[in-house]
Image: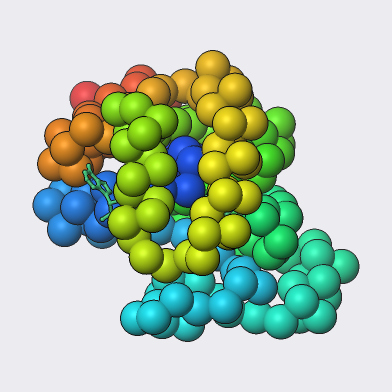
């Protein structure tokens, strides 16, 4: 009997759409040992309170380029002047062990993963309006106005790719969005080909 392989779940959405907040609520309320969040590597500076190895692996551009050369990324992308990448070994080890793995990544990287892994499930998240997106991004107080403007410009291109995703969740309230994200994971787990270890 084949062991169940985990599902690769991509979560994208413009900066400020609430990916981090919704995931935090999801893990607090619905997390279990069979769902893991991939920790990315990035060349961006840590924000106040971010912890190396927890939020990101904060690395230099030279170390990032070395990882690219050594094929250590499932995907990587340049986003608003910084590099971001998904370490490959964590993803594959956990999928092999039957765990679902969530990638919280921007759209360029997500499109690469969709190409490489056609069984990946993808979720796009958006706030209820463009004005609300801007309000949340400014309200977070983690970026300067010029960085916020770059992220909003990038958001327009990102949203134009929404239809390439399997699921679309509006992040109106965090609780409701996290519940919908949980429903997606539950539905994926109930797929027949994901229940290989069932015996009757
Ligand atoms: P992302 O990870 O997509 O960049 P964040 O999770 O950091 O976005 O959220 C951006 C800002 O919006 C944060 O200040 C967060 O507290 C706030 N936020 C997230 N979701 C909601 C929501 N449903 N309603 C109101 N504010 C929200
Ligand atoms: P932030 O700087 O706000 O943490 O992240 C900026 C953007 O980079 C977000 O859209 C986030 O989802 C994305 N991101 C984080 N990690 C990765 C990654 O490993 N690969 C890619 N392609 N994007 C990532």
Residue occupying image coordinates x 27% and y 35%? 171
Q: Tell which residue pokes out farthest to the right in this image.
A: 69
The quarter holding residue 7 reads: top left
Q: Is residue 68 visible?
A: yes
Give above or below for 135 relative to 67: above
Quarter holding the N terminus is top left
Residue at 66% x, 73% y is 43
**Residue 55, image x, y percentages:** 43, 71
Q: Is residue 170 left or right of residue 78?
A: left
Residue pictured at 59% horizontal, 23% vertical? 160
Q: Which of 32 and 2 is in front in this view?
A: 32
Q: Which residue lies furthest to the front in this view?
A: 145
Q: How is the image coloured?
A: rainbow
Q: Where 136 sits versus 164, above or below?
A: below
* Quarter of the image where the C terminus is located: top left
Q: Residue at x 19, y 43 (%)?
A: 174
Q: In this view, does 86 lie above or below 151?
A: below
Q: Quadrant of ligand 2?
A: bottom right
Q: What is the x, y in percent for residue 40?
A: 55, 64
Give the farthest residue toward the top.
163
Please provide percent x and percent y for residue 175. Answer: 13, 41
State the count of labels.
0
Depth check, front residue: 194 or 9: 9
Q: In the picture provided, is 190 more to the left or to the right than 60?
A: left
Residue 16: x and y, percent? 40, 48
Q: Can residue 113 be seen in this view?
A: no
């Amino acid at each position: 009997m084949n062991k169940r392989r985990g599902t690769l779940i991509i979560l994208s959405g413009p900066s400020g759409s609430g990916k981090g907040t919704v995931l935090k609520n999801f893990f607090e309320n619905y997390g279990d040992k069979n769902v893991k969040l991939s920790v990315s590597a990035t060349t961006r500076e840590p924000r106040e309170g971010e912890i190396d190895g927890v939020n990101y692996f904060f690395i230099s551009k030279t170390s990032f380029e070395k990882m690219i050369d050594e094929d250590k990324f499932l995907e990587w992308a340049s986003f608003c002047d910084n590099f971001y990448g998904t370490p490959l070994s964590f993803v594959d080890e956990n999928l092999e062990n039957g765990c679902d793995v969530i990638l919280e990544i921007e759209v360029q990287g997500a499109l690469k993963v969709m190409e490489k892994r056609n069984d990946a499930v993808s979720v796009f998240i958006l706030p209820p309006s463009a004005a609300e997106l801007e309000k949340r991004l400014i309200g977070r107080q983690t970026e300067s106005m010029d960085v916020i403007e770059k992220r909003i410009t990038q958001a327009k291109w990102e949203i134009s790719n929404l239809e390439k995703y399997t699921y679309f969740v509006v992040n109106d309230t965090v609780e409701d969005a996290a519940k919908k994200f949980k429903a997606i994971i539950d539905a994926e787990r109930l797929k027949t080909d994901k229940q290989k270890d069932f015996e009757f």
